Amino acid sequence: MLAVSEHDAGVWDVATMSGRAAYVTMCLAACWGVLTATGWVRKITGRAALLSTHQVLATFAMASAVTHVSALLVLESAPLTAYQLVLPLVGGGEVRHALGVVGLELMLAASITAALRRTVFHRNWVHLHRLAYVGVWLSAMHAWLGAAAGGHVPVVWLAGITVLMPAITVTVLRFLPPPLLVRLGVIAADPPVVRGGPTGVRVAVDHERCRHYALCQAQAPKVFRLLDDGRLRYARNPDAEQAPQVRAAARVCPVRAIRVDAVEVGGP
């Protein structure tokens, strides 16, 4: 076994600690981002989630990841080269390194577009920001493969699973259809419709509170539409058959900007 210099031993310590910090805060940022965007924190606690908390966690995760990567550039023995951090697998790179590099690049792209979301077409920003989910899981695979290569899996197993499983769970829930979420008890079911009573809905959106997450469009695309310039267009008096989708859209709005009132079909 080759002896490791004091310099490289110190560099590895920095890389290890920053890598673990990035892993934990990355999983926490993913969890908090989903809970914030869906409004589930309000359902659980009665209080709105703070978007700034997600931003702080994501920023710390990115800073730790950059520190982790930068440390590997200054190794005296077998250091990574700058071009390998841009073009993985070039020059005989390893797959686990490539996973980490691509994951970091995707999360960087999501972070940059999040900072520029007021100048980037909103629909493009939403699509790019969702790539952060892919970046998180690629980075998690990189972390576990790196731990396996270094023989540290038994040490980080408990902590790694502890923060990874909630992140996987809430991310999966984020993309499940509303009827299944109702059966799981994550969101409330629509109230039963009384025959002869009001069956239609009237929609109103508080544009001062709306943050244009586009979750309403995902639930009721025939009623809500987010334009390329970030403005929200919606039908104030949608068809009666759209009522369940509209109520679902109001439930998932994290800032509760959508008001839905029941009206009689054909009423004023």
Image: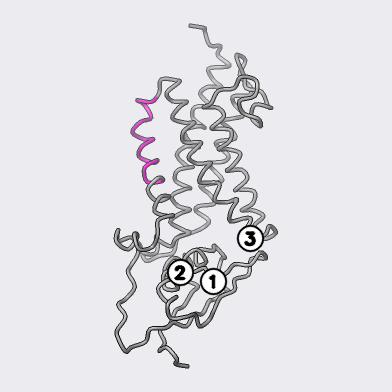
Q: CA distance from mark 2 to mark 1?
A: 9 Å
Residue range of the region highlighted in magenta in the rendering: 153-167
**Residue 213: x, y in percent?**
54, 62
Q: CA distance from mark 3 to mark 2?
A: 19 Å
Residue 106 on the magenta span: no
Asked whether disc 3 touches disc 1, contact meaning CB atoms under 8 Å apart, the reply is: no
Q: CA distance from mark 3 to mark 1?
A: 14 Å
Identity, as a three-letter code, of the amino acid under mark 1: Phe
According to the picture, the residue beneath numbered tag 1 turns out to be 224
Q: Is residue 80 left or right of residue 56?
A: right
Asked whether disc 2 touches disc 1, contact meaning CB atoms under 8 Å apart, the reply is: yes
According to the picture, the residue beneath numbered tag 2 turns out to be 249
According to the picture, the residue beneath numbered tag 3 turns out to be 122
Q: Residues within 10 Å of mark 2 (few under 14, many from 20)?
A: many
Q: Is residue 161 left or right of residue 76?
A: left
| Residue at x-position 48% and y-position 53% | 33
